[in-house]
Image: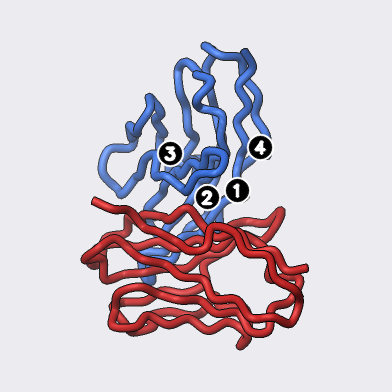
Chain colours: A blue, B red
Amino acid sequence: AQSVTQLDSHVSVSEGTPVLLRCNYSSSYSPSLFWYVQHPNKGLQLLLKYTSAATLVKGINGFEAEFKKSETSFHLTKPSAHMSDAAEYFCVVSDNSNYQLIWGAGTKLIIKP
Amino acid sequence: EAGVTQFPSHSVIEKGQTVTLRCDPISGHDNLYWYRRVMGKEIKFLLHFVKESKQDESGMPNNRFLAERTGGTYSTLKVQPAELEDSGVYFCASSPGLAIEQYFGPGTRLTVT
């Protein structure tokens, strides 16, 4: 069975400093992995996706994630946080046999001025 | 192009009442998914339509939940009778063909009192 673990429920960083949101996954075969973001009172938006091409994936708003098979990780990073990045971030793995999305518990990113 | 829309955005009902949630997918998307996030828990898959057919309903919690997709266009999710534990945010998503990227609506927040 596939699963996703987001290691931090909350991450707080100062504006202009790097962001690291951690995600580990468990999958019996080569997974497809995603990061989604939900801003307050908004819907879920796809940030980026990994589908067995390049292991370093670039997404929107300056975010990127690196797929590391040996560590079963897919951490999300951004070099410099902006106030508008404050949101909840979800790491997601896709079951490629039935297209169900399996979600992590979410990490709330707090940006301090 | 219009995105996935959901109606209503919020619904407050009493235990034992019936509620119907509606999702309009992106035009031309054959695949439609329902997910739910109960307070404090992960987002969970409920079911998947391909056109008007239920492809996978393994995530439906019990027979109080009924989903339909008339004519392969919009979908409804009816909860009858509603229980307190049904409170949460219900998300709808759609995707074209067999693509695994899913586009989400803003969600319906259901509160059962």
> What is the three-letter code of the residue carrying label 1?
Thr
Tag in front: 3 or 4: 4
Determine the CA span between mark 1 and mark 2.
Answer: 6 Å
Q: Is residue B72 left or right of residue B46?
A: left
The answer to whether residue A97 shows anywhere in this view is yes
Spot occupied by residue A31 in the image (x, y as percentages of width and height): 39, 55
Labelled pair 2, 3 in contact (Cβ < 8 Å):
no
Packing grade of label 4 (10 A; few <14, some 14-19, many >=20) is: some
Mark 2, residue position: A25
Tag in front: 3 or 1: 1
Packing grade of label 3 (10 A; few <14, some 14-19, many >=20) is: few
| Viewport quadrant of the C terminus of chain A | top right
Pointer 1 chain: A
Determine the CA span between mark 3 and mark 4.
Answer: 19 Å
Answer yes or no: are tags 4 and 2 on the same subunit. Answer: yes
Pointer 3 chain: A
Q: Secondary structure at mark 1?
A: strand
Is A81 above or below relative to A107? above
Q: Is residue A21 left or right of residue B22?
A: right
